[in-house]
Amino acid sequence: MVFTSRFSVTHLPGEVDLCGLPASVASWSLAIIGLANIAGSFTAGWLLGPLSRQGRAVLDVRLAHAVDLILSACAEDGVDLLLIG
């Protein structure tokens, strides 16, 4: 998640500027992303608290594989697949 946040902070303002939108769009977008990250972290901690460390690791790997499968299914061609992975 840290990579996604850093990527958004680095590239989102420039992309918003390229689209001709005001800088406030980028700032509000980053604020919403940050709040969603905080809420998600607290929710995940609350839901996964009862699991053992090994159980959380297994769940993490399975969720990562599920996301990879979903993104792979959404890829239109080989180039998209390379960009995803």
Image (spheres, rainbow, N blue to C red):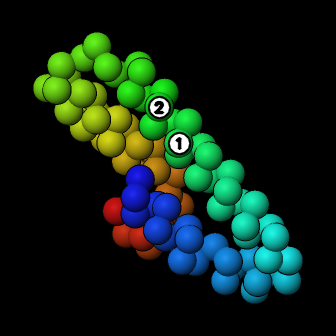
Residue 76: give its label.
none
Give the camera-side residue of 43 and 16. 43
Relative to 29, 40 lies left or right: left
* Percent x, y of residue 84: 42, 63
Give the percent coordinates (x, y) of residue 62.
Answer: 28, 33
Would you name the residue on which mark 1 appears?
A: 38
- Quarter assignment of residue 15: bottom right
Quarter assignment of residue 39: top right
Q: Can residue 7 be seen in this view?
A: yes
Q: Residue at left 74%, top 77%?
A: 16
Residue at left offset 49%, top offset 70%: 7
Looking at numbered disc 2 in the image, what kind of residue is underneath it? Phe
Residue on which disc 2 sits: 42
Q: Is residue 75 above or below residue 61?
A: below
Query: Residue 76's x, y, as percent?
Result: 53, 61
Element marked by disc 2: helix
Q: How far apart are marks 1 and 2 (CA)?
A: 6 Å
The C terminus - image quarter: bottom left
What residue is shown at x 58% (from left), y 77% (from top)?
A: 11
Query: As drawn, is 46 to the left or to the right of 19?
Result: left
Write the residue at 48% across / 27% down. 43
71 and 33: which one is in front? 33
The answer to whether the residues at label 1 and label 2 have Cβ atoms under 8 Å apart is: yes
* Rendering coords of residue 72 (x, y %): 42, 52
Secondary structure, mark 1, is: helix
Can the viewer see residue 69?
no
In the rendered image, the vertical position of residue 73 relative to residue 2, given as above or below: above
